[in-house]
Image (spheres, grey):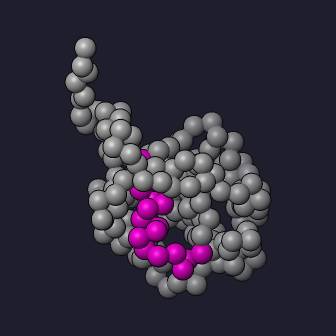
Amino acid sequence: MSIVSQASLPATGVGNIMKAKQNMTLEDIIANGEDSQVEVELDEIHPNQLAGEMVAFANTYGGRILLGIDDEGNIVGVKRENIDEWIANISSNNCQPTILPQISRIRVNGNIVIIIEVQKGVEPHKVSDGRYYIRVGSINREMSTFELARLFQQRQLVFLKRHQ
């Protein structure tokens, strides 16, 4: 994905889809809309909602949250001061275990867009109130008991005994 009109973003290691997206411009990504690996938000997002976005990406394939883009896809930039510290506090205090996102900033026509890159987690993640989320298309949803058990099994943290 290219930003600052044509600068490239680093790949997040989430497969061929993200490799293809790393060569896209920010404008192209915004025009394509949100999907299973891209979320756009204003920096007015509630901390618990941002934590849910990060957790959902960590529990699926990873992804990017672009802060500073409105619902119509306009690049309005971020207004919040100390945004790196704010994001770091949310990823530490509102996500369990802590998520360590890569935080980048890109200037587009005088506006700053923050890119929060979340890698696929090694272990399942939940928000501070105990809920686990996954990303399905452009939405996050709470995991079912079966999905959660399967996630723990995939991450080799629990072994389910099969009934024969």
The residue positioned 54% from the left and 41% from the top of the image is 14
Q: Is residue 56 shown in magenta? A: yes
The residue positioned 36% from the left and 53% from the top of the image is 132
Residue 66 horizontal/vertical position (percent): 60, 65
> What segment is highlighted magenta in the picture?
42-59
Q: How many marks?
A: 0
Asked if residue 148 shows in the view, the reply is no
In the picture, which quadrant includes the C terminus?
top left
Q: Return the residue found at the far top.
A: 164
Closest to the observer, 158 or 119: 158
Q: Is residue 125 shown left or right of residue 54?
A: left
Position of residue 71 relative to residue 95, above or below, is below
The residue positioned 52% from the left and 75% from the top of the image is 45
Q: Where on the picture, by quarter, is residue 32?
A: bottom right
Residue 160 horizontal/vertical position (percent): 25, 28
Residue 157 horizontal/vertical position (percent): 25, 36
Q: Where on the picture, by quarter, is residue 104?
A: bottom right
Q: Is residue 121 shown left or right of residue 158?
A: right
The residue positioned 24% from the left and 19% from the top of the image is 163
Position of residue 93 relative to residue 59, above or below, is below
Closest to the observer, 22 or 54: 54
Q: Is residue 120 shown in magenta? A: no
Position of residue 4 relative to residue 85, above or below, is above
Closest to the observer, 72 or 78: 72
Asked if residue 136 shows in the view, the reply is yes
Residue 55 horizontal/vertical position (percent): 41, 56
Q: Is residue 146 shown left or right of residue 161?
A: right
Q: Magenta segment, principal secondary structure?
A: helix
